[in-house]
Image (cartoon, helix red, strand yellow):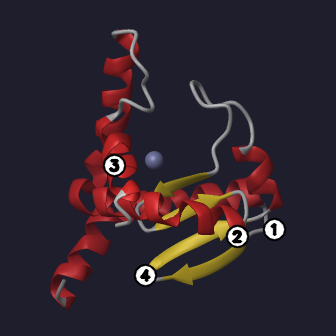
Amino acid sequence: MNRLKRSAAYAWASPNTLLGILLALIVGRGTNQWVWVDGVLEISGPKLASWLNRPWGALSSITAITFGHAVLAQSREAHDSTRTHERIHVHQYERWGPAFIPAYLGASGYLWLRGRDCYRENPFEKEAYENEKGGV
Ligand SMILES: [Zn+2]
């Protein structure tokens, strides 16, 4: 991707990135480790870990979660084990921009209302799981 397109992708996803950074600042309260990896800010730390490591609706815990170009995870090891999957979400944010979170939650809500698995059957998760198996 050329420099102009990369810049546009970062700008388009930036409201989500800002949300992730704010969440990490509030939840981590100064204990987080911030690492820049291949154009993505990877954030982890003990307070963030305990916040993610509790039930979230259909999930028993969250290992890592992506907001634009910021990924929040329980630890550096969690970043390493989820990087391929979370990078697919980064690309989804680059495509959807500010509409990503409403679209993701809307898809989950629709599935939940129909008695389906609102996480595994969510099309954004299906794309991420299918492509991580392919080693993208
Ligand atoms: Zn995912």
Q: Which numbered disc, 1 or 2, marks the residue that appears first in the sequence?
A: 1
Q: What residue type is labelled 3?
A: Glu
Badge 4 crowding class, 10 Å Cα cut-off, few under 14, some 14 to 19, many 20 or more, is few
Above or below: residue 39 compared with residue 81 = below
Q: Which numbered disc, 2 or 3, marks the residue that appears first in the sequence?
A: 2
Q: x and y percent of residue 11 in the render?
A: 29, 72
Q: Which numbered disc, 1 or 3, marks the residue that appears first in the sequence?
A: 1
Q: x and y percent of residue 103 in the render?
A: 28, 38
**Image point (22%, 59%), residue name:** 95
Q: x and y percent of residue 17 in the render?
A: 45, 63
Q: Is mark 4 on a helix, strand or loop?
A: loop
**Image point (60%, 31%), residue name:** 59
Above or below: residue 85 compared with residue 31 = above
Residue pointed to by mark 4:
39
Residue pointed to by mark 3:
130
Q: What residue type is labelled 1?
A: Thr
Q: Which numbered disc, 1 or 4, marks the residue that appears first in the sequence?
A: 1
**Image point (30%, 47%), residue name:** 127
The span from disc 1 to disc 3 (Cα, nearest Å) is: 34 Å
Q: In the picture provided, is 34 more to the left or to the right than 82?
A: right
Q: Nearer the viewer, mark 1 or mark 4?
A: 4
Residue pointed to by mark 1:
31
Q: What element carries label 1?
A: loop
Q: Is mark 1 within 8 Å of ligand 1?
A: no
